[in-house]
Image (cartoon, rainbow, N blue to C red):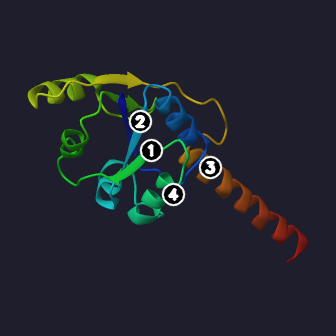
Amino acid sequence: MVRVMASGVFDILHPGHLHFLEEARKLGDELVVVVATDNTARQRKHEPMTPQDMRLKMISSLRIVDRAVLGRDGDMFAVVEELKPDIIALGFDQSHSEDRIKAELEKRGLDAKIVRLPELEHDLSGSRKIMQKVIEWYLAEERLKKVEGR
């Protein structure tokens, strides 16, 4: 049984996330997804819009996910030690250094292959792209209201 581990914040679930998880699932027999804690999301990306328990529930509900777990604050490799994946799938835009991950795995006596997955080419493939589209829509609506005198 080949266990694949994927991780992310998954704040606004979008097609890019689904593509990432579908590609990760193809790499093995079991897909375990680590959902970042609120603290980790704040440190690495931004203030999460949805709380960690809600994000964990959303990821857990996906058919392609065999198991979802909440990450650990502080030592991000603690959950890797617990799960002992055969493959760690990284998204195309995740800032994790593959060399740093390999070095840390070796230091901890873990043997996992690191696979960087391809990007989904779509205008709604990222949280920031979606937020930008919402902002643009909102601003256009506000301009229209002013023009129409609403």
> Which quadrant does the C terminus fall into?
bottom right
Of residues 83 and 105, the one nearer the viewer is: 83
Q: Which residue is mark 3?
A: 130
Distance, label 4 to label 2, CA atoms, is 18 Å
Q: Which residue is mark 2?
A: 30
Which sits earlier in the primary sequence, circle 3 or circle 1? Answer: 1
Which sits earlier in the primary sequence, circle 3 or circle 2? Answer: 2
Quadrant of the rendered image containing residue 103: top left
Residue type at mark 2? Glu
Residue lying at the far front in this picture: please name it: 1
Callout in the foreground (4, 3): 4
Task: Kindly identify which numbered label has been placed on residue 66.
Answer: 1
Distance, label 3 to label 1, CA atoms, is 27 Å
How many residues crowd around disc 1 within 10 Å: few (fewer than 14), some, or many (20 or more)?
Answer: some
User: Considering the numbered disc 3 on the image, is that residue within a helix, a strand or a loop?
Assistant: helix
Distance, label 4 to label 3, CA atoms, is 18 Å
Callout in the foreground (3, 2): 2
Residue type at mark 1? Asp
User: Considering the numbered disc 1 on the image, is that residue within a helix, a strand or a loop?
Assistant: loop
Q: At 59% from the left edge and 47% from the top edge, which residue is drawn?
A: 14
Callout in the foreground (4, 1): 1
Q: At 67% from the left edge and 56% from the top edge, which residue is drawn?
A: 134
User: Considering the numbered disc 4 on the image, is that residue within a helix, a strand or a loop?
Assistant: helix
Callout in the foreground (4, 2): 2
Question: In the figure, 15 relative to 101: above or below?
Answer: below
Quadrant of the rendered image containing residue 101: top left
Residue type at mark 3? Ile
Q: Which residue is mark 4?
A: 58
User: Considering the numbered disc 2 on the image, is that residue within a helix, a strand or a loop?
Assistant: strand
Distance, label 4 to label 1, CA atoms, is 13 Å
Quadrant of the rendered image containing residue 41: bottom left
